[in-house]
Image (cartoon, rainbow, N blue to C red):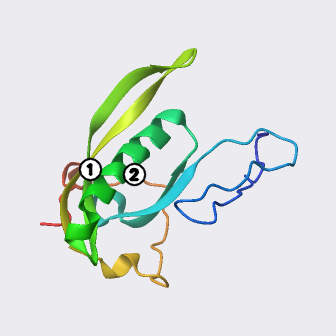
Amino acid sequence: MAPETIPEFEWDPSITKAAPRPRTPGEWKRAFECKVFAENALGGVRVWSSNSTGACMGVSDLHDQYMAAANDNDGLVPVVEFTGGKHAKVGKGTTSIPQLKIVKWIDRPAELEDGAAAPAVTASAPAADAQQSTDDFG
């Protein structure tokens, strides 16, 4: 993609059904997008999206954890901990796979509800205390 080009997305119709490969020219890659929330570490709700192989592998592993425990946690959302990255050889190169672990289940924070106001984005990094204090969920 050229610099300053707005990315195009072709969304899957559902989580269980992939969209057909777009017929338009260009390089298309599988990707994901999801909302994440951590008041202290992120300053509120953020959208995490990526088309990197490693990130997609990490989210796929997280989805497997979610599916294994979702029925026992009806109506709740997972609190996920990033425990590090694991380097792996994929094809001709290497990638870093985020290690994500569901540590508990909680009621959905109001900030994640549809229509919740998004926080203002600032260019400054979070304060050092905020970077170290990531336990927003007790």
Q: Which one is nearer the viewer's eye here, 109 or 71? A: 71
Tell me if label 2 and label 1 are in contact, CB under 8 Å.
yes
Where residue 125 sits: x, y (%)?
A: 39, 51
Read off the residue under disc 2: 125
Q: Quadrant of the N terminus?
A: top right
| Among numbered discs 2 and 1, the one appearing first in the sequence | 2
Q: Which one is nearer the viewer's eye here, 53 or 125? A: 53
Q: Is residue 10 left or right of residue 78?
A: right
Image-quadrant location for residue 79: bottom left
Where residue 98 sits: x, y (%)?
A: 36, 38
Residue count near mark 1 (Cα–Cα under 10 Å), binned few <14, some 14–19, many ≥20: few
Q: Is residue 56 left or right of residue 13?
A: left
Read off the residue under disc 1: 131
In three-dimensional space, the C-alpha distance between marks 2 and 1, rounded to whole angstroms, equals 9 Å
Q: Secondary structure at mark 2?
A: loop
Residue count near mark 2 (Cα–Cα under 10 Å), binned few <14, some 14–19, many ≥20: few
Q: Residue at x 34, y 54 (%)?
A: 126
Q: Which one is nearer the viewer's eye here, 51 or 38? A: 51
Q: Residue furthest left?
A: 138
Q: Nearer the viewer, mark 2 or mark 1?
A: 1
Where residue 44 sits: x, y (%)?
A: 37, 68
Q: Residue furthest top?
A: 92
Kind of residue at disc 1: Gln
Where residue 53 sits: x, y (%)?
A: 53, 34
Q: Residue at x 53, y 57 (%)?
A: 33
Kind of residue at disc 2: Ala
Number of numbered discs overlaid on the protein picture: 2
Q: Residue at x 42, y 46 (%)?
A: 60
Q: Quadrant of the C terminus?
A: bottom left
Q: Secondary structure at mark 1?
A: helix
